[in-house]
Amino acid sequence: PFDLVTCFHVLEHLRDPMAALKQFAEWTAPNGLVYIEVPNMGECDPNKGFGAFHFAHVVGFNQHNLVLAGLLSGLRPKRMVSSTGIVFEHGTTAEASSVASKGRQLAEQLYSSNRPLRNYVLYQMSKL
């Protein structure tokens, strides 16, 4: 196990960033840390349109979904270095279960009128 795992501007290029985050959690020693930094898609200039996205970015992150992805992967945010530069520590299984449960409830509410999207989101969450 490692005391520190870092990942600078890589997660947004992966098809399954959750799998990578879970692997980082496994690689980290019990008191170790994981530092993740990704571009903040929440701060993109809306006037750029499609040009705001780099073609190699498979997933876009902002502070909220990066924290959520970390929590669902067993990592708890310890310190915010920047909006999408976050130091994580090991979370608990209970925290991840609680977040996943709340996420499923939120998906039911947010996408209740869009059945295909609701089913897709719930399916993705069922894999967590």
Image (cartoon, rainbow, N blue to C red):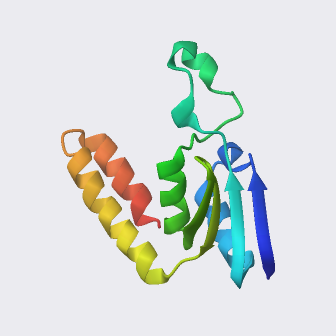
| Foreground residue among 41 and 125 | 41
**Could you say where residue 96 lies in the image, as x and y percent from the top left?**
45, 73
Residue 45 placement: quadrant: top right
Residue at 34 percent across and 56 percent down: it is 122
Question: Quick check: 12 left or right of 60?
Answer: right
Question: Quick check: 86 left or right of 4?
Answer: left
| Foreground residue among 13 and 5 | 5
Residue 13 placement: quadrant: top right
**Could you say where residue 22 lies in the image, as x and y percent from the top left?**
62, 69
Residue at 81 percent across and 78 percent down: it is 2
**Could you say where residue 29 lies in the image, as x and y percent from the top left?**
73, 83
Residue 20 placement: quadrant: bottom right
Is 107 placed above or below 95 here?
above
Question: Quick check: 115 left or right of 67?
Answer: left
Residue at 43 percent across and 76 percent down: it is 95
Is 98 placed above or below 68 here?
below
Question: Quick check: 81 left or right of 128?
Answer: right
**Could you say where residue 15 lies in the image, as x and y percent from the top left?**
64, 48
Count the marks: how many? 0
Which image quarter is the N terminus in?
bottom right
Residue at 74 percent across and 76 percent down: it is 27
- Residue 16 in view: no
| Foreground residue among 21 and 31 | 31
- Residue 93 in view: yes
Q: Residue furthest bottom?
A: 30
